[in-house]
């Protein structure tokens, strides 16, 4: 038997449970005046595969409750615990950029591997780590967002031209473009700080009247989309549609993106956000069915 445990307020968890045809129960989390947290599971998990759905954006506040929930589920008789973290935090620090820095992606992977039996996530930030198995010791399944994004583009955008924000995105953007039956170009991006980027159009635009569709994995400040929209205007293209897998930007940043000429901004529902328009539950359900070799750790 399988049961879904949801981080409080997760609409994705309910949708995933519907896809899996199983019960969904919400974790109860209470914060005490001293800042410590109490986690309670209000459903019987004896003998179950527990699917804990909890995104790891702002992971500092979430990791300990997730660890408490995993331990509690196991002590209450769960057969196996699969963490579904649609957004997987702490993946950017994949090397020591300055002397003395912690390689936090490796440390965080070790911590998560110690509390869950398997991991399912959506398009993690893989750069110097090329696969999760390099740092995670538990089975880890990556669910791609390319097909759901491509389907959304086909249904909602006329004459789309898929635009990748930088050279690293070329293969991913080209995959989306192929699935959406659209051409693809890639921009050249130079980042000069946490929130400063400059962008130019690196590829020749094919002849025709196109609607540019900017695609990026993570939108945190919106600066990349703002700079990309300006580059596309300089190239004589229409105001773009922007699509992010993981929308982490606040409403002020989102307003700035729209003011910069982005016609429409949508995101996958990996992170609860006002721009969520692309459902990932079907793809995550498939990823859960695919994950293999996760051991049972119940005593």
Image (tube, rainbow, N blue to C red):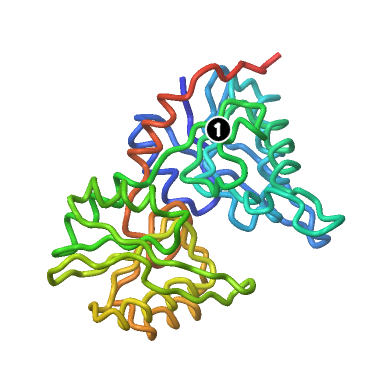
Image spot of residue 162 (x, y percent): 28, 60
Q: Is residue 229 above or below residue 148?
A: below
The number of callouts visible is: 1
Identify the image quadrant of residue 106: top right
Q: In this view, does 184 lie above or below 112?
A: below
Is 267 or 285 nearer to us in this picture? 267
Residue linked to disc 1: 43
The residue drawn where x is 67% and y is 18% is: 297
Q: What element does badge 1 sit on?
A: loop
The residue drawn where x is 32% and y is 65% is: 203
Is 94 or 188 nearer to us in this picture? 188
Q: Is residue 50 above or below residue 282?
A: above
Please say whether residue 71 is visible from this viewpoint. no
Q: Which residue lies furthest to the right in this view?
A: 100
Image spot of residue 216 (x, y percent): 42, 60
Q: Which residue lies furthest to the bottom in this view?
A: 259
- In the shown orientation, is residue 116 left or right of residue 215? right
Q: How crowded is mark 1: few (under 14 residues within 10 Å), some or many (20 or more)?
A: some
Image spot of residue 54 (x, y percent): 55, 45
- In the shown orientation, is residue 192 left or right of residue 141? right
The residue drawn where x is 44% and y is 29% is: 288
> The C terminus lies in which quarter of the figure?
top right
The residue drawn where x is 44% and y is 43% is: 13
Image spot of residue 298 (x, y percent): 67, 17
Please say whether residue 107 is visible from this viewpoint. yes
Q: In this view, does 78 lie above or below 181?
A: above
């Amino acid at each position: 038997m399988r049961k879904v445990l949801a981080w409080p307020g997760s609409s994705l968890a309910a949708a995933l449970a519907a896809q899996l045809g199983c019960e969904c129960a919400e974790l109860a989390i209470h914060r005490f005046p001293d800042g410590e947290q109490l986690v309670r599971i209000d459903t019987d998990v004896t003998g179950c595969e527990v699917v804990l759905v909890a995104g790891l954006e702002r992971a500092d506040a979430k990791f300990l409750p997730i660890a408490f929930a995993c331990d509690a589920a196991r002590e209450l008789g769960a057969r196996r615990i699969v963490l579904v973290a649609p957004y997987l935090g702490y993946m950017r620090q994949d090397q020591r950029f300055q002397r003395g820095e912690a390689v936090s992606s490796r440390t965080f992977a070790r911590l998560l591997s110690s509390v869950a039996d398997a991991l399912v996530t959506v398009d993690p930030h893989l750069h110097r780590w090329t696969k999760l198995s390099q740092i995670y010791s538990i089975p880890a399944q990556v669910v791609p967002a390319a097909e759901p994004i491509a389907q959304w583009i086909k249904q909602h955008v006329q004459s789309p031209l898929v635009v990748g924000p930088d050279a690293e995105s070329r293969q991913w953007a080209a995959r989306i473009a192929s699935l959406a039956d659209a051409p693809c170009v890639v921009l050249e991006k130079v980042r000069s700080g946490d929130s400063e980027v400059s962008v130019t159009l690196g590829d020749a635009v094919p002849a025709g009247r196109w609607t540019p569709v900017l695609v990026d994995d993570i939108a945190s400040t919106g600066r990349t989309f703002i700079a990309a929209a300006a580059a596309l205007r300089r190239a004589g293209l229409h105001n773009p549609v922007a699509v992010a897998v993981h929308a982490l930007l606040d409403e002020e940043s989102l307003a700035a993106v729209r003011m910069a000429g982005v016609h429409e901004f949508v995101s996958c529902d990996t992170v609860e956000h006002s721009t969520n328009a692309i459902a990932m539950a079907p793809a995550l359900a498939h990823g859960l069915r695919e994950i293999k070799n996760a051991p049972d750790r119940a005593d």
